[in-house]
Amino acid sequence: MADILLPKLSQNLLDILNDEEYYDITIEVGNDPYIKIFRAHMVILHYRSPYLRRILSTNKKKNDGTLVHIKLPNISPEIFQIILR
C-alpha cells in the first residue's frame, strides 16, 4: 500500500510547490541582476529544513493574511531551486 501512496504524495508535494494560488511566503534569492522570487508554503519549509526553520521563526506569518517575504541574497537561484525541490 505504501508503495502506491508515497509516489502520489511526492507528486502532490511537487504540485503544491508549483501552486500559484495558495502559497503564503515569497523568497527572494540571488543578487542583481540574477534575482528570482520563489513562492512556497511556510509549514512545509518549517518541517523540511532546519536552516529555513530558523529563518522563518523570526518571520512568522501574521493572522491578517499578509504574505511573508524573505531575502536570501547569498544563495543562487539555481541552488535554491534544488533545495526547494
Image (tube, rainbow, N blue to C red):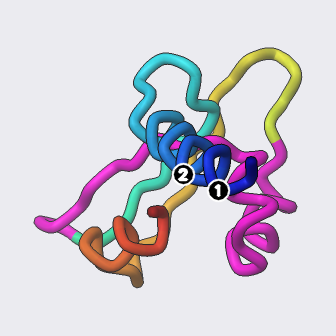
Q: CA distance from mark 1 to mark 2?
A: 7 Å
**Quarter of the image that includes the C terminus:** bottom left
Q: Is residue 25 left or right of residue 33?
A: right
Q: Quadrant of residue 29?
A: bottom left
Q: Is-magenta flag for residue 58?
A: yes
Which label belongs to residue 3? 1
Q: Residue furthest left?
A: 33
**Residue 14 versus residue 81: which sits nearer the camera?**
14
Task: Tell me if mark 1 has few (under 14), some (14-19) or many (20+) residues whose alpha carbon lies within 10 angstroms of its own.
Answer: few
Residue picked out by circle 2: 7
Q: Quadrant of residue 69?
A: top right
Q: Residue furthest front?
A: 1
> Start and end of the magenta stretch?
32-60
**Depth-wise, is mark 1 or mark 2 nearer the camera?**
1
Looking at the picture, how far across and down is residue 56, in whole percent? 76, 59
- Amino acid type, mark 2: Pro
Above or below, 55 relative to 58: below
Name which residue lies at 11% across and 65% down. 33
**Residue 27 versus residue 21: which sits nearer the camera?**
21
Element class at badge 1: helix
Name which residue lies at 56% across and 42% down. 8
Name which residue lies at 86% across and 61% down. 57
The reply to whether dot 1 and dot 2 touch (C-beta < 8 Å) is: yes
Name which residue lies at 83% across and 60% down. 58
- Amino acid type, mark 1: Asp
Looking at the picture, how far across and down is residue 73, in whole percent? 40, 74
Above or below, 66 relative to 73: above
Q: Is-magenta flag for residue 36?
A: yes
**Residue 17 versus residue 34: which sits nearer the camera?**
17
Q: Is residue 36 left or right of residue 72?
A: left
